[in-house]
Image (cartoon, rainbow, N blue to C red):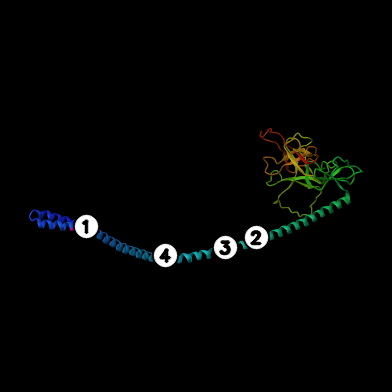
């Protein structure tokens, strides 16, 4: 501002110099010099004014900023303090929940431990009881076996396991031996099977059981084969009825509305096997043996080397065009065919009628009553 005033004065002096006298000019110059002489003072004063204004503004600004900050802090604290309180409460709840969960975990663990211990104890007790019962049962079973062995030993002798090749004679009579898992007893002449399988079978075509002398076969009874009349419907497997049965204690009437049975006889061509004859009544004998037996069919002997044939023969059955359904039986090829009576019930030789599975067509069928050696 001072510099601007000085510039105006200077210009005024120059302009006045053109129209005024020297006195006026000199006075203007003097005033102008005075103005310029006070320039430094004016500058110093201006600087002081600016400093004061700056200090005042700075103080006012600092106070305003401090007040604004304080106000912001107060406002923020007003919002933050409830959040802090809620956080503290939530933290307390989390701690309480964690404490509850830990308590539950402890209770569950203790409960499971208790239940497991109880279960383990029950299982252990059951196993102990089972073992005790099993031991008692085994002891009782062994005692029973020992008693049986002692009884047998006292009656007929001790069972030997080293007598496979021991001869049976008067010196070894009463001796028992174990051969291939089967117990045999010596009667002074031969070894006989004791216990084990018992087979009952019919020896068709004879009135005497084969093998009575050397195979240990026992004959129960003898008679003739009976079945259905060839023109009658019905019939089934042949039955060996004992000779001399009479009325067998049963009632009788004249009504034919019954299942009728007639004595069976052989018919048809000869099977070309032993002494089997046609047009003969069929004798039979029911037999017993202390061995396992089965009826072999369609081959020339027993299929297993562990078995042997008690008797062999040919199959006979009902004629294919007859109404009666008489099943097949194995007739002994060395039988007793001596009765030629006839009552209309017939059996015919069985033969294969198809070249199939390695068999020849029109071949008669052989059979064997096989029992374990």
The mark lying in front, picked from 3 and 2, is 3
The dot on residue 80 is 4
Q: CA distance from mark 1 to mark 4?
A: 59 Å
User: On the picture, is 13 further left or further right than 183?
Assistant: left
Q: CA distance from mark 3 to mark 2?
A: 21 Å
Which one is earlier in the sequence, the residue at label 3 or at label 1? Answer: 1
Q: Tell me which secondary structure the magenta stretch mostly adopts.
A: helix
Helix, strand or loop for disc 3 = helix
Q: Which residues are magenta?
A: 34-43
Q: CA distance from mark 3 to mark 1?
A: 88 Å
Residue 334 is situated, as x and y percent measured from the top left of the image, at 80, 37
Q: CA distance from mark 3 to mark 4?
A: 32 Å
Which one is earlier in the sequence, the residue at label 1 or at label 2? Answer: 1
The dot on residue 116 is 2
The dot on residue 102 is 3
Does any portion of residue 110 appear in the rendered image?
yes
User: On the picture, is 26 further left or further right than 53?
Assistant: left
Where, by quadrant of the figure, is residue 270 drawn?
A: top right
């Amino acid at each position: 501002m001072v510099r601007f005033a000085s510039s105006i004065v200077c210009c005024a002096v120059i302009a006045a110099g053109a129209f005024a006298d020297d006195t006026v000019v000199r006075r203007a110059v003097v005033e102008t010099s005075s103005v310029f002489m006070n320039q430094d003072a004016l500058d110093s004063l201006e600087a002081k004014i600016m400093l004061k204004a700056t200090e005042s503004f700075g103080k006012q600004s600092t106070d305003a900023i401090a007040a604004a900050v304080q106000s912001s802090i107060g406002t923020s604290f007003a919002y933050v303090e409830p959040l802090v309180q809620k956080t503290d409460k939530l933290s307390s709840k989390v701690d309480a929940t964690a404490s509850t969960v830990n308590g539950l975990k402890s209770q569950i663990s203790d409960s499971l431990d208790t239940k497991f211990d109880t279960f383990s104890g029950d299982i252990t007790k059951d196993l102990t009881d089972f073992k005790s019962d099993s031991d008692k049962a085994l002891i009782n079973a062994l005692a029973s076996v020992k008693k049986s062995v002692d009884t047998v030993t006292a009656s007929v002798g001790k069972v030997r396991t080293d007598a496979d090749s021991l001869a049976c004679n008067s010196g070894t009579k009463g001796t028992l031996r174990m051969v291939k898992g089967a117990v045999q007893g010596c009667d002074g002449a031969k070894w006989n099977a004791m216990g084990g399988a018992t087979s009952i079978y019919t020896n068709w075509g004879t009135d005497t059981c084969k093998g009575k002398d050397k195979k240990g076969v026992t004959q129960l009874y003898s008679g003739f084969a009976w079945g259905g009349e060839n023109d009658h419907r019905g019939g089934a497997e042949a039955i060996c009825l004992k000779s001399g049965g009479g009325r067998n204690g049963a009632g009788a009437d004249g009504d034919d509305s019954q299942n009728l049975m007639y004595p069976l006889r052989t018919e048809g061509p000869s099977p070309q096997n032993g002494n089997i004859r046609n047009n003969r009544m069929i004798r039979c004998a029911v037999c017993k043996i202390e061995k396992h037996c089965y009826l072999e069919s369609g081959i020339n002997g027993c299929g297993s080397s562990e078995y042997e044939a008690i008797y062999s023969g040919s199959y006979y059955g009902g004629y294919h065009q007859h109404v009666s359904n008489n099943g097949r039986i194995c007739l002994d090829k060395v039988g007793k065919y001596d009765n030629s009576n006839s009552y209309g019930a017939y059996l015919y030789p069985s033969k294969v009628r198809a070249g199939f599975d390695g068999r020849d067509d029109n071949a008669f069928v052989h059979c064997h009553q096989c029992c374990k050696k």
